[in-house]
Image (cartoon, rainbow, N blue to C red):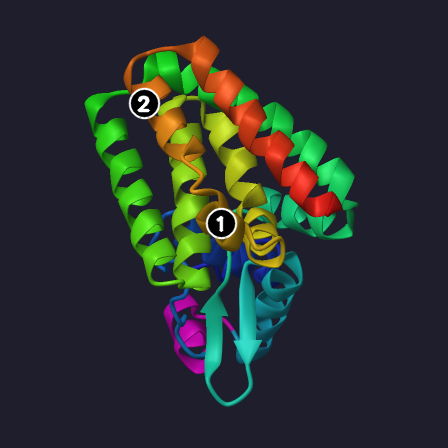
Amino acid sequence: MKNVERAPSLVDGVIAELRQEIAQGVWQLGDKIPSETRLAEMLQVSRLSVREAVRVLVHAGLLTTRQGHGTFVTATDEAQVALRRRLDEAGATDVMDVRRGLDLVAARLAATRRTDEDLERLREALDRRAAASGKADVEAFADADVDFHLRIAEAAHNSVLQDLYQGMSDALRDSIKVDQCMEHTIARNDTSHEELYEAVRHGDPTTATAVVLTILDQQERDDRD
């Protein structure tokens, strides 16, 4: 870190430095950042300036303070934080409408742009999903299901689409658990996610988007039941 003492605003300078550490991955998601005293020494500013900068980043959603434990990184992108907050406020129908649009675009592009590495990552997520289903592990199933859909978005190789889908991941994970998706998958012996994988693997965007519609239509029916 560079000395920010000569910056026009010490607090703004500290905020910029802390944001940069997070953005560059020096402090990753879940990491505990250095103590207030240590940061003041590193940046050669007062502890008061550090405290105010941390308060701003806590409000922005990048950091969280746990009493007696320290301050931790909870997000790396303020735009994603804002999107998650908006999704938390939105109705279920509105969220599903947005997801429908994103999933259709992601599947179509993934089927035409996926690489062998993308397929390996999709296969790994599907295998974890199947294993979690076999163990009736709801948490692991939700994580694997979200990972699969995120990797479809990644296989589209569109950074904006990927960021938008990443921002929806928490809402998607919650809906999978609340809507009992694992239980429905087991009861119906649902193979739609495998079918989506195969469509992407074979470079078939028409089938990929058709399968996505089947998945989302079924989820909407489950929500109404």
Which corner quadrant of the image does residue 95 belong to? top right
Report the front residue among 148 and 134: 134
Q: Is residue 103 visible?
A: no
- Give left or right: position of 78 versus 156: right
In the rendered view, tell whether residue 25 sits above or below residue 50.
above
- 222 shown above or below 180: above
In the rendered image, residue 33, in percent from the top left (x then y), is placed at 41, 70
Residue 27 in view = yes
Tell me the residue that label 2 is attached to.
198
Q: CA distance from mark 2 to mark 1?
A: 22 Å
Please report whichever mark, 2 or 1, sits nearer to the chain's N-terminal start.
Answer: 1
Q: Quadrant of the N terminus?
A: bottom left
Disc 1 on helix, strand or loop? helix
**SS for callout 2:** helix
Amino acid, disc 1: Ala
| Camera-nearest residue between 52 and 75 | 75
- In the image, the segment drawn in magenta is 36-45
Q: Is residue 199 magenta?
A: no
Q: Residue at x 31, y 43 (%)?
A: 125
